[in-house]
Image: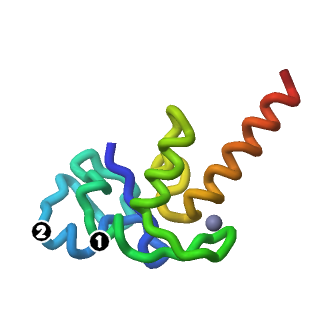
Amino acid sequence: MGWFSLINGNFKPSDNYLKSHNLEDYEQDDVENEDYDVEEDDDAMNMTRTCDKCGKSFTLADAIMEYDSFADGTSYMENYAGEICGECAIDELEDAWREADQYQ
Ligand SMILES: [Zn+2]
C-alpha cells in the first residue's frame, strides 16, 4: 500500500519521484496509490519538515524509523504521513494507550 506524504500542504509523492516513475492511475489529490512506495522516494523521505505539534524539524525517514520501531504493529505512514514528528506521534500513541487502559 502506498501512502503519500504531506508535501507543501498536499498528500502526494515528490515531484522528482513522479518525474522518474509512472504511477498507474495517479491523479492529483489522490492520497494513496498501490504502485507508490514512500521509502523509495528519496526526496519525500529526506526533505526537512516542520512538526505541526511541536514545531521541530524532522524527516520522514526518522519519523518512520522512530515510530514504527516503537509502535509494534501500527504504522506511522498510515496515521501521520509527515504531519507530525516521530516523538509527537509516539506521545499520541502513549496517550491513546493510557486512555484505553482506563476503560478496561
Ligand atoms: Zn513534534
The x, y position of residue 54, in whole percent, is 68, 71
Given the image, on which type of amino acid does mark 2 rest? Ser
Which residue, given by chain and number where applicable, does mark 2 sit on?
20
| Residue found 82% across the figure and 37% down from its top | 99
The answer to which image quadrant residue 96 occupies is: top right
Say above or below: 23 vs 49. above
Left or right, 7 with reference to 35 = right
Q: How is the image coloured?
A: rainbow
The x, y position of residue 40, in whole percent, is 24, 57
Residue that lies at the very extreme toward the right in this rendered image: 102
> Disc 2, ligand 1: is the CB inside 8 Å?
no
Q: Is mark 2 on a helix, strand or loop?
A: helix
| Residue found 25% across the figure and 75% down from its top | 15
Sequence-first tag of 2 and 1: 2
Left or right, 59 with reference to 71 = left
Question: Can you tell me which quadrant of the image ligand 1 is in?
Answer: bottom right
Quadrant where the N terminus lies? top left
Mark 2 crowd level (few <14, some 14–19, many ≥20, 10 Å Cα): few
Given the image, on which type of amino acid does mark 1 rest? Asp
Say above or below: 16 vs 103. below
| Residue found 28% across the figure and 63% down from its top | 27
The x, y position of residue 35, in whole percent, is 22, 49
Mark 2 or 1, closer to the camera: 1
Residue that lies at the very extreme toward the top in this rendered image: 104
Q: Is mark 1 on a helix, strand or loop?
A: helix
Which is nearer the eye, 41 or 64? 64
Quadrant where the C terminus lies? top right
Which is nearer the eye, 88 or 17? 88
| Residue found 78% across the figure and 31% down from its top | 100
Mark 2–mark 1 distance (CA, rounded to whole Å): 12 Å
Which residue, given by chain and number where applicable, does mark 1 sit on?
43
Mark 1 crowd level (few <14, some 14–19, many ≥20, 10 Å Cα): some
